[in-house]
Image (spheres, helix red, strand yellow):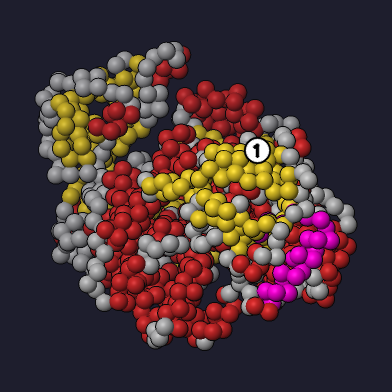
């Protein structure tokens, strides 16, 4: 009698038995699988969105640049640089030029606002279009002194087409409302709303003076025979020498594609967390399912079914369920995917299509089936150990996963899968390890807390408490309890919501802190030296303080220890930060440090005697990045004059303060006479005073730009709201999954509790008493899970605060307390809602049905 | 007459919570083919454990069991499952029907497992024999206790077993239904020429078998 003689596996029979066995449990099994549905829906929606987005970026890449080639520089090109532009112009069918800078504009109602002025010449864009209302305005504004004004600005200042707008010294007629410009997303319009004007009027505005911070853009529509990428690769070193950046359709496509593939990868991870949570639910559900099938399996074994045949019957069932859940999830995901473009429209510079992505659907279904199988395997393995003896009496050999080598194989596969999936979505092993360890840690902590809870309740069981409390408490550890799975599901869900709330609070707090009393809340910049005293006088005249006034000089770093950018280019063995060489810095000079900076290495020398070499101070992180040490010799080009300097000290700078902070600070006496502009800071008490000052300044000094912290706050608030919406939208999948796992876990435990509740009813327990016992059990569970979830969230947001946002961690504990109470109340409500059926029906009916 | 079941010096010890429990001690017995045997004894005497070991549902701690010429001791769990499917039938005190299968499907399972193409016809014939031809599509929960046990008997005979083990087959039934079941069991057994080993408290039922084995404290006191 060897295995050769055993029955062959008849798969048709296995499938038939799997189908027959599921008969009485289908609705329950579907409930179990519903947690997978949500996870798969999230992933399919995200995959399809990513798929469409990648295709859309591919198809619309030309409209992102608006031309075949774009060159840009942050200063006016010298003659040699201009030659490069001219040579490309000769290869082009058409070309355009643009000067772009930040400036104040004045609306008809006197309202002022910092905008991005885009002075345009030529027929740009060549691909895509400036979407305007009226449509013709995109062309007509160039023919006369017209301006296109961003739609948010029009709305904010109640401006209409035909109104006039003051840019610098010059009035423009608003020719149209700008809806969309090539390559612009909703967010970029919020941060820097654009005003297009014809380039020919720029000098008349008086805004392009020497020292103005203008970016120069050149757009080319090349001849058919010219390949933009080949052209720029030929010109690469020339462009680098003149510090001219470029964008071709291909390079922009690649860059935009990379950014948004990062986005969809991040979103996939969020969906994956939802799916993992769902899988825990599935694993627990299958565990209970198999437990209930123990007798059936034992009978089958008695009748001669082998252990692997029994295993296969339930494996087929799980695969079928996984398949059904995944197909439903994929269908739901395809529906959700129709909504995603609207959710992300503010962030994406292309129009996103809504086509069905079969690749995403196939991926989602495949992942769903695989993950259901993987997580169901642990409880399924126990089937192999179910002895036929169970038909006669309960087996003495309970299944211990820890003693089964196959269980360890499954654990390994799960770990491998999580790490593998994460590594596909994340860049580099560090992130993968952090994500995987984070997930494992969250599960482990919740598991440990749940186990500890069970142990503590058992160990210190309050025998003197009244019966209802004792019964509610003891439900936490009695056979077939759902304590661990519920604590994990509720805890993870709570942790997710709490982290979102804490991070949002932290970011708002960070800005609000800056808005606190005595801190400056308005910054005036681009003040010419000649205007300095008059502006300060104007501020004081309005009864406002001048809190800070700093000169700013633009310098170019030419050499580090005698090595120039050219040397570094020619000899790649030279260890020097190439990116720093040739770079322009905006620096200041002063004799004393400000209170937001402190010396961490070297010594600060406040003044430089005539003839001495300046001992400058670098911000420590930046010095590390450009690999500069104390004592290194730097050579600067200050608007044509070469100035040597020695690195005298490193500073630690508190960047979180509303204050002018600099990577590089010169001592007084070196660049004091160089061309410079000034920044002035003040504090305005309210919006009216703020508007008054802005109008007064812009009217007298149109070149001066003003940043109002109130504006920054409102912009930030707007952006955070938009980001918050996306995060909440994605987070809702996890929360919804947590909710479904919670509901299904509670329902499973209802089946466990039904008999004893009915017995209690039979023995005379009132409906109230049964409900009290149930409410107490779920109250303990909900409270401990929510509490642990909040602790986890505090840990993770502390890490985010310290390592990522670099802000002090001040959690809102009241909010957390409300969250704990809310989650506990929700758990109790779900528990009670599920128990209603038991208490409403007569005991006999339930007993009969149960029998 | 040939022996279909041979039990030699079999012991069964359970270890639980650091204690050992000698449930069976040095049991030896022979059962002849086509005979009827009952095992009687008080609760806890080891009757059901002995039945389980003889049917290959569990492994003996020591000793040897030969069932229909096959030594069970060295077989794996799956190999013993094969032996059960080929040679053994069961009737349990609590019927042990699969709740998600209809009466007909319950009877068909052992035949389907053997790959028998006529499983439906054979099962219908058997249901007819036990008087339930018209209840084939009912689920166990829709049948009375007596009817469930009749389905269980039909299932026990469906694979034409060499030996039938019955554990308190009438234990959960009233006297009248119990008697009907007893008669059915013996009648089908006689017709099929199957060996019957039954465990019971009921001495009246035991007296209907050719041989009575009495047990007490894990030992056979009267073979």
Does residue A452 show up? yes
Marked residue chain, label 1 = B
Task: Kindly identify the residue that appears in the image at 33 percent across and 29 percent down.
Answer: A625
Task: Kindly identify the residue that appears in the image at 24 percent across and 19 percent down.
Answer: A632
Q: Is residue B132 left or right of residue A238?
A: right
State the residue in front, A385 or A22: A385
Query: Farthest front residue?
Result: B222
| Quadrant in the rendering for residue A303 | bottom right
Rendered position, A583 above or below A522: above
Q: Is residue A111 a member of the stretch shown in magenta?
A: no
Element class at badge 1 = loop
Task: Kindly identify the residue that appears in the image at 72 percent across and 34 percent down.
Answer: A2
Q: Is residue A143 left or right of residue A805?
A: right
Considering the image in quadrants, where does the N terminus of chain A appear? top right
State the residue in front, A422 or A91: A422
* Residue identifier under label 1: B75
Rendered position, A231 above or below A765: above
Q: Is residue B186 a member of the stretch shown in magenta?
A: yes
Q: How far from the left and from the top, in percent, is residue A150?
A: 50, 61
| Quadrant in the rendering for residue A477 | bottom left
Q: How far from the left and from the top, in percent, is residue A833?
A: 47, 78
State the residue in front, A364 or A506: A364
Start-end of magenta stretch: B177-198
Q: How far from the left and from the top, in percent, is residue A588?
A: 23, 37
Rendered position, A255 above or below A563: below
> Label 1: few (<14), some or many (≥20) within 10 Å?
some
Which is the main secondary structure of the residues drawn in magenta?
helix
């Amino acid at each position: 009698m060897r295995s050769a003689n055993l029955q062959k596996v008849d798969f048709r029979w296995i499938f038939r038995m799997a189908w027959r066995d599921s008969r009485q449990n289908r609705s329950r099994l579907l409930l179990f699988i519903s947690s997978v549905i949500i996870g798969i829906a999230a992933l399919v929606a995200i995959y399809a969105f990513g798929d469409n987005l990648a295709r859309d970026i591919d198809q619309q890449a030309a409209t992102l640049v608006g031309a075949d080639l774009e060159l840009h520089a942050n200063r006016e090109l010298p003659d040699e640089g201009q030659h490069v532009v001219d040579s490309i112009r000769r290869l082009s069918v058409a070309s355009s030029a643009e000067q772009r800078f930040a400036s104040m504009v004045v609306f008809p109602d006197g309202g002022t606002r910092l905008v991005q002025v885009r002075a345009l010449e030529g027929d740009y864009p060549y691909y895509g279009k400036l979407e305007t209302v009226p449509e013709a305005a995109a062309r007509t504004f160039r023919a006369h002194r017209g301006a296109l004004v961003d739609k948010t600005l029009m709305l904010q200042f109640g401006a209409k087409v035909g109104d006039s707008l003051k840019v610098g010294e010059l009035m423009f007629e608003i020719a149209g409302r700008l809806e969309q410009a090539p390559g612009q997303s909703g967010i970029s319009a919020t941060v820097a709303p654009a005003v297009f004007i014809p380039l020919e009027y720029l000098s008349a505005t008086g805004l392009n003076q020497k020292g103005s911070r203008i970016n120069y853009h050149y757009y080319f529509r090349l001849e058919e025979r010219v390949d933009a990428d080949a052209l720029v690769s030929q010109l690469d070193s020339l462009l680098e020498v003149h510090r001219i950046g470029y964008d071709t359709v291909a390079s922009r496509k690649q860059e935009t594609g990379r950014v948004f593939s990062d986005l969809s990868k991040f979103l996939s991870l969020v969906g994956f967390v939802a799916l993992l949570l769902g899988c825990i639910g599935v694993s627990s559900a299958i565990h209970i399912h198999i437990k209930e099938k123990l007798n059936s399996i034992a009978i089958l074994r008695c009748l001669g079914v082998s252990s692997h045949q029994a295993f296969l019957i339930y494996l087929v069932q799980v695969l079928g369920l996984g398949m059904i859940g995944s197909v439903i999830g994929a269908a739901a995901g395809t529906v959700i995917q129709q909504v995603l473009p609207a959710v992300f429209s503010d962030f994406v510079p292309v129009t996103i299509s809504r086509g069905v992505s079969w690749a995403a659907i196939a991926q989602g279904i495949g992942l769903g089936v695989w993950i259901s199988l993987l997580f169901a395997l642990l409880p399924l393995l126990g089937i192999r150990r179910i002895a036929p003896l169970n038909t006669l009496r309960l087996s003495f050999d309970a299944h211990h996963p820890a003693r089964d080598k196959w269980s360890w194989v499954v654990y390994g596969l799960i770990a491998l899968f999580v790490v593998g999936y994460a590594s596909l979505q994340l860049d580099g092993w560090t992130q993968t390890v952090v994500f995987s360890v984070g997930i494992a840690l969250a599960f482990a902590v919740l598991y440990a807390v749940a186990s500890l809870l069970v142990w503590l309740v058992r160990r210190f069981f309050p025998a003197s408490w009244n019966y209802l409390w004792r019964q509610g408490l003891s439900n936490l550890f009695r056979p077939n309890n759902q304590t661990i799975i519920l604590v994990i599901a509720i805890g993870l869900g709570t942790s997710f919501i709490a982290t979102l709330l804490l991070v949002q609070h932290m970011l708002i707090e960070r800005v609000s802190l800056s808005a606190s009393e005595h801190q400056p809340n308005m910054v005036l910049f681009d003040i010419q030296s000649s205007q300095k005293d008059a502006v300060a006088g104007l501020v004081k005249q309005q009864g406002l303080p001048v809190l800070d006034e700093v000169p700013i000089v633009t310098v170019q770093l030419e050499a580090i220890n005698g090595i120039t950018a050219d040397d570094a280019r020619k000899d790649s063995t030279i260890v020097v930060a190439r990116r720093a060489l040739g770079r322009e810095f905006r620096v200041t000079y002063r004799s004393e440090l400000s209170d937001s900076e402190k010396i961490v290495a070297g010594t600060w020398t406040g003044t430089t005697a005539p003839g001495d070499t300046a001992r400058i101070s670098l911000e420590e992180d930046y010095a590390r990045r450009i690999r500069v040490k104390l004592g290194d010799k730097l050579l600067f080009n200050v608007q044509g004059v070469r100035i040597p300097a020695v690195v005298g000290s490193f500073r630690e700078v508190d960047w979180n303060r509303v204050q002018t902070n600099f990577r590089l600070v010169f001592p007084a006496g070196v660049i004091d006479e160089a061309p410079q502009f000034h920044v002035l800071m003040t504090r305005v008490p309210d919006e009216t005073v703020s508007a008054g000052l802005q109008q007064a300044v812009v009217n007298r000094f149109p070149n001066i730009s003003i940043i109002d912290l109130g504006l920054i706050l409102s912009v930030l608030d707007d952006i955070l709201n938009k980001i918050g919406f996306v995060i909440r939208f994605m987070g809702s999948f996890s929360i919804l999954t947590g909710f479904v796992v919670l509901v299904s876990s509670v329902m499973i435990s209802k089946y466990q509790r039904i008999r004893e509740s009915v017995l209690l009813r039979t023995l005379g327990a009132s409906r109230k008493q049964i409900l009290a016992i149930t409410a107490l059990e779920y109250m303990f569970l909900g409270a401990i899970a929510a509490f642990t979830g909040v602790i986890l969230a505090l840990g993770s947001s502390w890490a985010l605060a310290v390592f990522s946002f670099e802000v002090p961690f001040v959690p809102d504990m009241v909010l957390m307390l409300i969250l704990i109470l809310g989650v506990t109340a929700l758990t109790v409500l779900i528990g009670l809602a599920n128990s209603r059926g038991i208490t409403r029906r007569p005991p006999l009916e339930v007993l009969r049905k149960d029998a | 007459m040939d022996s279909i079941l041979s039990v030699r010096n079999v012991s069964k010890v359970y270890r639980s919570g650091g204690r050992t429990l000698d449930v069976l001690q040095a049991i030896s017995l022979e059962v002849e083919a086509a005979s009827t045997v009952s095992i009687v004894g008080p609760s806890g005497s080891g009757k059901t454990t002995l039945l389980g070991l003889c049917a290959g549902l569990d492994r003996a701690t020591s000793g040897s069991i030969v069932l229909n010429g096959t030594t069970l001791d060295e077989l794996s769990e799956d190999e013993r499952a094969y032996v059960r499917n080929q040679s053994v039938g069961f009737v349990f005190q609590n019927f042990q029907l699969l709740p998600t299968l209809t009466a007909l499907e319950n009877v068909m399972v052992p035949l389907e497992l053997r790959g028998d193409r006529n499983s439906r016809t054979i099962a219908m014939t058997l249901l007819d024999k036990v008087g339930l031809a018209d209840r084939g599509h009912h689920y166990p929960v829709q049948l009375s206790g007596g009817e469930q046990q009749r389905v269980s008997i039909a299932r026990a005979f469906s694979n034409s077993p060499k030996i039938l083990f019955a554990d308190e087959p009438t234990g959960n039934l009233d006297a009248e239904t119990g008697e009907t079941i007893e008669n059915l069991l013996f009648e089908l057994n006689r017709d099929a020429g199957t060996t019957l080993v039954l465990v019971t408290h009921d001495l009246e039922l035991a007296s209907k078998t050719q041989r009575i084995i009495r047990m007490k404290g894990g030992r056979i006191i009267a073979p």
